Image (spheres, grey):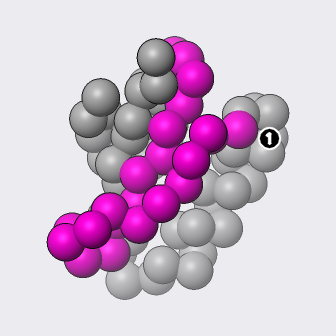
Amino acid sequence: MLHTVEVGSFCGDLIAALSNMMTWLNSRGSQPVILQEAAGQGTAFRLRFSTEAEALAFVCAFGGRLVG
């Protein structure tokens, strides 16, 4: 089962936010299964993780919400 996180609060700096997320993912050796833009949500992304622990750690680090 995949655990989906939706994140979309970037405080106006999408490039810096994405860079920070990628740095965080790389430093933890975490590899989300899918990174996609959330349709109809403005600037929001969904990441799918193979474990709930990874998904929750990402939510704690960047906000967002666990959606599945």
Looking at the image, how many numbered discs can be counted on the residues? Answer: 1
Vertically, is 8 above or below 53?
A: below
Q: Residue 57: in sight, yes or no? A: no
Secondary structure of the residue carrying tag 1 is helix
For the record, the magenta segment spans 31-54
Front residue of 12/29: it is: 29
Vertically, is 60 above or below 19?
A: above
Residue 12 percent across, percent down from the top left:
37, 83
Residue 68 percent across, percent down from the top left:
29, 29
Dot 1 amino acid type: Ser
Q: Is residue 8 magenta?
A: no
Q: Is residue 35 magenta?
A: yes
Which residue in the rendered view is the most extreme toward the left?
40
Q: For this view, does 68 lie left or right of residue 58?
A: left
Which residue lies at the image location 66% right of the left edge and 68% below the top edge? Answer: 19
Front residue of 43/34: it is: 34
Q: Residues within 10 Å of mark 1 (few under 14, many from 20)?
A: few
Read off the residue under disc 1. 27
Rendering quarter of residue 30:
top right
Which residue in the rendered view is the most extreme toward the front?
1
Which residue lies at the image location 47% right of the left edge and 25% below the top edge? Answer: 2
Which residue lies at the image location 58% right of the left edge and 75% below the top edge? Answer: 16
Which residue lies at the image location 60% right of the left edge and 55% below the top edge? Answer: 21
